[in-house]
Amino acid sequence: MKKWGGIVSLGLVILLGSFLGLARPPVDVFVFGSTVEAETLDPHDTIDNFAWRAIYYCYDRLVKFVGETTEVEPALAISWEVSENGRTYVFHLRNGVTFIDGTPFDAHAVAYSFKRLISLKKPAYGTIEGILDIEGIEVIDDFTIKFTLNFPFVPFLASLATNQLSIVSPGIQKYDVGDYAAAWLAEHSAGTGPFYVKEWRRGDVIILARNENYWGQKPFFREVHIRYIPEAAVLRELLEKGEVDMAEVLTDEQLDAMAKVPGIRIFEAPSFSVCRLYINCTKPYLSDRRVRQAISFAIDYDAIIYGVTKGHAVQMRGPIPIGMWGHDPTVFQYKRDVERARQLLAEAGYSGGFKLTMLIDPGIQAWVDTAAIVQANLAEIGITVEIVGYARPTMRAMIDRGEHELSIGYWTPDYPDPDMFAWYWFYSGNHGLAGNRSFYTNPRMDELAVGQRAETDPVKRLEMLKELQRIAVEDAVYVYLYQRTYRTAMREWVKGYVYNPMLLYMPNFDTMYKDYGA
Amino acid sequence: MISTIPQLFKTFQWLVQRPLFLVGGATVVTISVIAVLAPIIAPYDPLKIDVIKRLQPPSLQHFMGTDHLGRDLFSRVIFGARISLMVGVTIAFTSSALGGALGLLAGYFGKWLDNIIMRICDMFFAFPPLILAMAIAASLGPSLQNTMLALVIVWWPRYARLARSQVLVLRELDYVQAAKASGAGHLRIMLKHVLPNAFSPILVQVTLDIGQAILMAASLGFLGFGAQPPTPEWGVIASEARIYMRDQWWYPTFPSVMILLTVLGFNLVGDGLRDVLDPRQRGRLSKS
Amino acid sequence: MSIFSFIVRRLTFQLFVLFGVLTITFFISHIIPGDPALLLAGPKASPEIIAKLRKDLGLDQPLFRQFVIYVSHVARGDLGTSVFTRRSVAQDIVERFPATFELVTVAMFVASLLGILGGVLSAVYKDRWVDHLFRLLGIAGSSMPIFWFGLIMIYLFYTRLGWLPGGGRISMYTSISQKITGLYLVDALLTGDFAAFKSAILHLILPVIVLSFATVSSILRLVRACMLEVLSQDYIRVALAKGLHERRVVFIHALRNALIPALTVLGVTYAELLQGAVITESLFAWPGMARYAVSSMTYLDYPAIMGLTLISAVVYTFMNLVVDILYGVIDPRIRYD
């Protein structure tokens, strides 16, 4: 018996020994760990930044953002002219570019791509809905295309750099089964970009491979692996052990702890991504703006910022984020003032208090925590809040139908223009998921919201935006909670990372590189 | 079958000689007391947020430390005991009552009623309980009530089958036949003769199931289908705590250990009861 | 009764059960609050798509009609289109099934092995410390919240000790070159890829331990009870008296007889394992069916939820059928139902 025991233990030790030893990825393979999985890879479908991360670098667009700025420069379009009235854009396109499937890039491809986006009518379409229609797309010649907008949409050029307006190869039509090839494109890529989708093992990893025939600067990485790791705790371990090169989305807690780990770099920068509470103005009690103001005064903004974001956020000042053109730094900012809140409630006739429900997605811990704090804050002024949790799609459907009273959400602008807030949040035509999630209606606001997006004179536009912000705050349409600091974690051997506030959660795979010697 | 006082007493004597049963019993009793007295013994309001004091380690002010929003973990865990016990007992009793009644009817009356009820049971047995409960809870909307409803729906069949098999045996016994022959009504027979004796294995199953129900409800809470935050249900707390495992290991550990101890307690008690009430063991009982 | 007619009887029975499963699944999908077409199409669907779906599924028709449509779809293998992945649910499930199957089957082996070993030792050394230890461990296993056990294992073996991987089925730098069965262990062996095989095993160790721990207790308990029963029987004592070496008697004769009734627990064990897999796969980023169940239920992807519930019932039923038949084959007495 002893003999057997000895041999078995020896065998186990040898076996164990041969198994041990961790490996880090080869230097030309970039491994990215994500706790959020992409739902589809079709650029004309999704408005989810996490899906964009895999999609963005498989495609090009007419223009692209310059480095870390929000300025745009030529990409697939080498030059352009804009008409006097701001409604007509003519683009001159780059020669000698081919899509990954071999189809040559030209104006017909651009027209096809835009038409597809419009016809699919998926959420991505929202970026140009009402701005550009199929009739407005005109192919002038093989490398010239003209867009005639419905009105002089000021941020049009910037919007062309967004993921939704990626140029998709007309070659995908052979996969069309009556769905504009949506089923096929959901899992493959068909762009001109520096990478292409080599394989997608759902629930596991998306593998991007370098496009060896790319027209621009070829990326350093031969492959990019975007791994789906649902447990944030596990993802953190993988990063600390060097088995992944970069990781998102980790909690502020974890990032703070990892900042002290040698070999790991935490990058942070202010972003335009904001968190706001929706206050449904069509519901009883909430239709009275004094009640909404009372709520705005009752919230403990500092506690939320400290407790939920661990201090990695800045309280919003009005609806337009700090740092964006058009933001009015003089607009009023609510601060916690329980007395004032009670007073306002009494004025409105509700000193006895009342009940409200707050709708959240309990899967997002930050929302759970914020709701808990809001619940405690409002209890102090006599409002009893019941937290109601539904999974995101149901929550979004309910918000779209205006069934919520209080709710919460993040909002990240796709293009660097205050229009992303002014028009989406306050225009009465955008009630619901489109952006106006407080179901707010105010004719004066409508005038301003619609007017500012077509106002080509920046001085006049600024005036309109100032008034819009003032009303937005006075009417307490939303509770403007905070503006998030974007944070991401990577190994120190990852170099060349460039942060662009328009490209949140979409690190520049095409221009990064690794240096293990460092 | 324990139907006389001296036998009851002997059973009790036998039980308390078994250390595992005692440990289990003591655990169950302690936790029940804690649950009942929760509002009195909890030092803080389980929902009271104090973000400045977040994630503090166990101390004299906070026996189990604080959670990520500064709430006192000890108070939350105590109230969690209340919820878990309520959930476990409700589910076990409701499903045993429902299932037991149906099984009783099925076994007693037999024929087509038996067939229908048993076939329905078979259909439910085809599902792994957790998955069926998840589907029901997800469809109705995640909440503690819906989770309990889902688990009752999922669990009643096992009691039906248990009750029925007991009844089938008992139905043939002499004194039941005698009662029938002397013209006693069905209901009287069922209640007076059959039920008390079918009772013991059901009691064992119920005890074990309270533990299992607590475990399942906590698992559902952990996955997000059960109680919703900020309710201090153990599974919910553990779920919120999981990312803090590394640096604040106590945070997910305390509620999890509570689950472990509670379920263990019920399992030990149930096991002890089963050993006692198992006909094969009764021989040993009479020998001692 | 011959084996054949026994099998036919059991099969018919299970088919009937499956029909009931369909009924229950269908019924569940109709207790959804809200407009089913809206929820089945997903929040991003256009009105045209919703209308089309309504027509396809016959949602404006009487319930019975809808059920018929549903059954005919399922019979064709059409389980609907997932709202989240936009692909056929059947395809999603087929893709993920091998991962879960591999995990659960390996866990089954491990649990059975440990359960049998523990049960036998417990029975043989009854009431001694071995018995008490194993029984306590067994009970602890069935009382332990699996999510905590998993977190602890990951923390210990991955975070602190770094001996085992923290998630996934295989290392990031190896892959199975040819997917033949979808079971990484089998495929790696078939293609002779030792590195992949090694990696797959390493990745299986922790999830299998976590998953099987809870189940070992039921197996252990049953084996122990059966062993005790058998050991107390006369013919065993006779065999001992005849002078056969004690160990041989125990392991060969008693074990075989004890295992026959213990077989009945295999079916239930499979259900326990499937349930445990739900949490285990979530913790270990295991790309299987169970984790897909959690994500689809979290996102209220109704077609996927219904498809998964159905499939899990089918798999479980099938396992029960296999166990039933095996039992019937081994123990002829059972056939006389």
Image (tube, coloured by chain):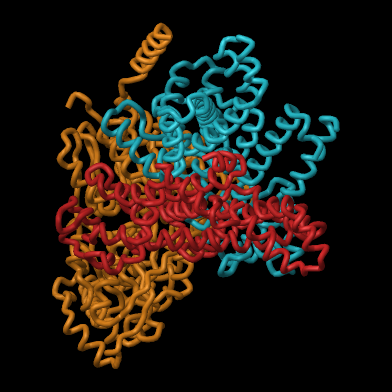
Chain colours: A orange, B red, C cyan
How many numbered circles does the render carry? 0
Q: At 55% from the left edge and 14% from the top edge, which residue is drawn?
A: C247
| C57 and C206: which is toward the camera | C206
**Which of the two residues, B37 or A99, is positioned nearer the viewer here?**
B37
Tell me what residue is drawn at x 23 percent, y 46 percent. Answer: B248
Q: In screen coordinates, is B231 left or right of C290?
A: left
Q: Quadrant of residue C34?
A: bottom right
Q: Quadrant of residue A31?
A: top left
Q: Is residue A121 visible?
A: no
Q: Position of residue A344 (x, y in %)?
A: 23, 88
Using the image as rendered, state which of residue C246 and residue A277 is in the foreground.
C246
In the rendered image, the quadrant that contains the N terminus of chain A is: top left
Q: Is residue B7 visible?
A: yes
Residue C36 coordinates in the image, percent (x, y): 60, 65
Which quadrant does the C terminus of chain A fall into? Answer: top left
Query: Does C252 appear above or below A359?
Result: above
Q: Position of residue B76 (x, y in %)?
A: 29, 60
Residue at the image point whose x is 18% and y is 53% from the top: B56
Left or right of C204, for residue B254: left
Q: Residue furthest top?
A: A3
The residue drawn where x is 56% and y is 44% is: A184
Q: Residue A307, image x and y in percent?
A: 21, 60
Q: Is residue C14 left or right of residue A224?
A: right
